[in-house]
Image (spheres, rainbow, N blue to C red):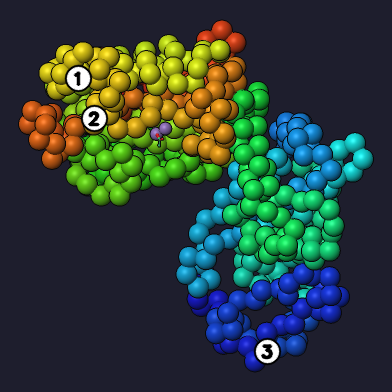
């Protein structure tokens, strides 16, 4: 933001007009006095008028409007007679008047398709169900100067949809969110809210909600997301397809990463994510050499060296906020060494076994168990563990090097459905429409004295996004090669181009 646009501080900040102040739950927030332009009466008057009417009419609903309506209907059926409050969340200050990028809460996005900061979905109980209303900030007020004097005014941050426009897009009645806290305070009857996103809304409900009842709502919304509808599967495929292109981008610039650092890889993938999607779905793990043994290496400030492996774990988040979560472990120079290949192929074999175990009716744990068994067998075969394999598995001894679970649900959150009950998730059964990652790995820490020296500092993970289908599964990320010889051939093509 250009400081030269900001003249002297004002004597008095512009006052919101009386009518807006009466109806607003909170006064309009203005930029800090010290940074704020001086406003003469003449200028304030001048800024009120001379603006075209830009209201949009006849807007088509968002593509997922039918699906969000069905999700709200399922929620309504689960909590009859109760008011349900689902906030998008607010901006978080990074410093002074600078904010972190906003990302609406998963629950709100799931139920509305909207991503607007400060939005709140309310399901108001009615006979036979609920009436859903979305509460949003309306267009910036021109009369009171909010549009140009408030830090979140449209002149500073961009045009918002009017409430009438939002209604057309989302298929929901829309109201002014600034009146919502007062209305919630006054309302009577049972209420539940999704916590952790909007302190103002929570404050309005303090005396009306309990942590236990709110948790039931969060759990329900987590479990409801386990089976993806056709729209969601399409979005996940888009996320994966962009991610495949992002991995190709990275392979093409490995020489530049060698000349700089892991940051070149992070930046390259991020460019793809921002150009084709909303963002990355989680911090990209660009782990070269021994950094590959650090599961969530996101500092990405290390050297990239020929002869080492690069573990790249990254996912594009679509404009609708569905994310991919894909890992490939690539030889920086395009060819695996003998030992790297041995370890890579073992992880590949484990992943093959894991993917084969993903099918409707299988226990969720089956794919993990299948992959762990292969890895335990390899570790025994290589003499790193003493057999028999059954004993290794019973004691979990392979975990010194396998470290993490073999996968998780994927969707709007990279670790989707995380609030689901055990019986609905890790102790549950796979169903068509579930989407999960299968991501076994082997990690030999640089300081692990229990393995031969040449193993130390090698980390391999292979991660794909697998959709459970009626008759088995579909690998959404099959566009990226996985087998070691296929990875090498794919890299060779890209590195020549
Ligand atoms: N990228 C985090 C994970 O694979 O779970
Ligand atoms: Mn991952
Ligand atoms: Mn994952």
Nearest the eye: 490 or 212: 212
What residue is shown with label 2?
401
Real-space Cα separation, disc 1 to disc 2, in angstroms: 9 Å
Real-space Cα separation, disc 3 to disc 2, in angstroms: 64 Å
Secondary element at image label 1 = helix
What residue is shown with label 1?
379
For image coordinates 44% across by 13% down, the residue present is: 357
Secondary element at image label 2 = helix
Real-space Cα separation, disc 1 to disc 3, in angstroms: 73 Å
- The outermost residue toward the left is 453
* Contact? badges 1 and 3 (CB < 8 Å): no
Q: Of callouts 1 and 2, which one flags the residue occurring earlier in the amino acid sequence?
A: 1
Q: Where ligand 2 lies, by image quadrant?
A: top left
Nearest the eye: 99 or 89: 89
What residue is shown with label 3?
12
Q: Is residue 181 above or below residue 481?
A: below
């Amino acid at each position: 933001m250009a400081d030269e646009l900001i003249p002297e501080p004002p004597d008095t900040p512009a006052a919101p007009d009386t009518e807006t102040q009466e109806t607003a739950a909170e006064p309009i927030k203005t930029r800090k006095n010290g940074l704020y332009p001086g406003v003469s009466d003449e200028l304030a008057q001048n800024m009120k008028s001379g603006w075209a009417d830009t209201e949009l009419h006849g807007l088509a609903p968002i593509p997922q409007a039918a699906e969000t309506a069905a999700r709200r209907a399922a929620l309504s059926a689960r909590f009859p007679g109760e008011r349900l409050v689902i906030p998008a969340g607010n901006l978080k200050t990074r410093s002074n008047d600078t904010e972190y990028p906003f990302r609406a809460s998963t629950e709100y996005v799931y139920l509305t398709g909207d991503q607007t900061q400060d939005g709140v979905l309310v399901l108001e109980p009615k006979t036979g169900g609920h009436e859903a209303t979305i509460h949003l900030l309306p267009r910036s007020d021109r009369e009171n100067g909010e549009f140009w004097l408030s830090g979140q005014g449209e002149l500073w941050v961009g045009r918002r949809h009017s409430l009438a426009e939002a209604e057309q897009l989302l298929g929901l009645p829309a109201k002014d969110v600034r009146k919502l806290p007062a209305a919630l305070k006054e309302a009577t009857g049972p209420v539940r809210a999704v916590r952790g996103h909007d302190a103002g809304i929570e404050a309005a409900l303090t005396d009306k909600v309990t942590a236990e009842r709110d948790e039931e709502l969060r759990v329900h919304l987590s479990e409801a997301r386990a089976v993806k509808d056709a729209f969601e599967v399409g979005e996940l495929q888009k996320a994966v397809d962009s991610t495949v292109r992002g991995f190709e981008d990275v392979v093409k610039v490995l020489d530049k990463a060698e000349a700089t650092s892991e940051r070149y890889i992070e930046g390259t993938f991020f460019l793809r994510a921002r150009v084709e999607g909303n963002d990355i779905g989680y911090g990209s793990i660009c782990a070269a050499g021994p950094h590959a043994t650090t599961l969530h290496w996101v500092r990405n400030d290390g050297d990239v060296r020929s002869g080492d492996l690069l573990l790249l774990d990254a996912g594009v988040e679509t404009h609708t906020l569905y994310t991919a979560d894909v890992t490939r472990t690539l030889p920086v120079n395009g060819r695996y060494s003998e030992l790297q290949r041995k370890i890579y192929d073992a992880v590949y074999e484990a992943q093959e076994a894991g993917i084969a175990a993903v099918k409707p009716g299988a226990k969720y744990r089956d794919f993990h168990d299948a992959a762990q068994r292969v890895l335990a067998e390899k570790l025994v075969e290589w003499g790193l563990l003493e057999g028999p394999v059954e004993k290794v598995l019973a004691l979990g001894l392979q975990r010194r090097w396998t470290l993490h679970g073999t996968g998780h649900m994927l969707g709007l959150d990279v670790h989707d459905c995380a609030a689901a009950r055990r019986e609905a998730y890790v102790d549950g059964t796979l169903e068509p429409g579930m989407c999960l990652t299968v991501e076994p790995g082997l990690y030999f820490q640089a300081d692990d004295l229990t393995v031969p020296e040449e193993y130390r500092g090698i980390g391999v993970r292979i991660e794909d996004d697998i959709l459970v289908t009626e008759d088995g599964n579909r690998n959404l990320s099959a566009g990226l090669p996985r087998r070691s010889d296929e990875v090498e051939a794919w890299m060779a093509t890209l590195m020549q181009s």
